């Protein structure tokens, strides 16, 4: 989710179905947030380093990636009350607005979702990837627009 590598259905549908099915829609954002905090601690402890602390986050996650991961929690918890698509689109819009260096106005039209996902995936290279996308043939853009929406 953090790098927008998959469409919303692939990321959230099974998870959302499980929480709705198992809890009969009585789940709220704090329940989902607790799950992700547990997942974060599980990830941190996946490679035990006695007495050395949480090396996985310190040495193997670039700070911008870790910050994006933590920032995503406030969006993922919305899956309790919003659709998969709503959660993903809100996340992509915020990531676009918060990107450094600035990417300009949010994209509109058929390429909007593809461009916002590419910006998340490219991270610091978004200013190179987005012009490359714009230089593609219309046919290639159409394929990516469909595949990434």
Image (tube, rainbow, N blue to C red):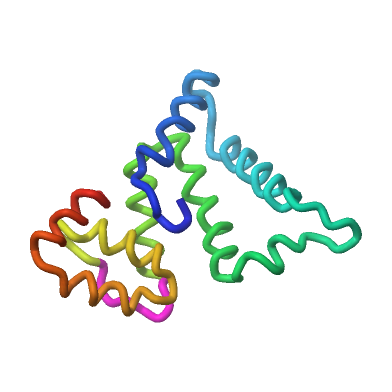
> In the figure, is residue 101 to the left or right of 136?
right
In depth, the one of 64 and 133 nearer the eye is 133
Residue drawn at point x = 73 percent, y = 48 percent:
46
Q: Is residue 149 above or below residue 70?
A: above
Q: Is residue 85 above or below residue 110?
A: above
Of all residues shown, which one is farthest toward the right? Answer: 51
Q: Quadrant of residue 4?
A: bottom left
Q: Quadrant of residue 85?
A: top left
* Relative vertical location of residue 88 with respect to residue 107 in this rendering, above or below: above
Which residues are the magenta region?
A: 99-106
Residue drawn at 43 percent across, 35 percent down: 81
Give the tally of numbered discs.
Answer: 0
Along the line of sight, the residue nearer the viewer: 76 or 66: 66
Task: Residue at 66%, 49% (x, y): give it.
Answer: 40
> In percent of the image, x 23 and y 77: which residue is there?
131
Looking at the image, residue 74 sits to the left or right of residue 49; the answer is left
Point out residue 149 in the picture as x, y percentages from the top left corner: 25, 49
Residue 133 percent coordinates (x, y): 22, 70
Q: Is residue 8 magenta?
A: no
Q: Give above or below for 82 relative to 50.
A: above
Q: Is residue 105 magenta-colored?
A: yes
């Amino acid at each position: 989710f953090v790098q927008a590598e998959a469409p919303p259905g692939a990321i959230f549908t099974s998870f959302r179905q499980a929480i709705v099915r198992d809890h009969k829609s009585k789940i709220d954002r704090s329940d989902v947030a607790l799950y992700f905090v547990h997942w974060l601690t599980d990830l941190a402890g996946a490679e035990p380093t006695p007495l050395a602390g949480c090396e996985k986050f310190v040495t193997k996650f670039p700070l911008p990636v870790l910050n994006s991961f933590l920032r995503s929690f406030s969006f993922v918890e919305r899956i309790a009350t919003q659709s998969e698509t709503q959660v993903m689109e809100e996340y992509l819009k915020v990531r676009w607005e918060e990107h450094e260096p600035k990417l300009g106005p949010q994209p509109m039209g058929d390429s909007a979702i593809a461009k916002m996902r590419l910006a998340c995936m490219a991270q610091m290279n978004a200013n190179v990837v987005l012009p490359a996308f714009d230089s593609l043939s219309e046919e290639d853009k159409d394929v990516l627009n469909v595949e990434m929406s």
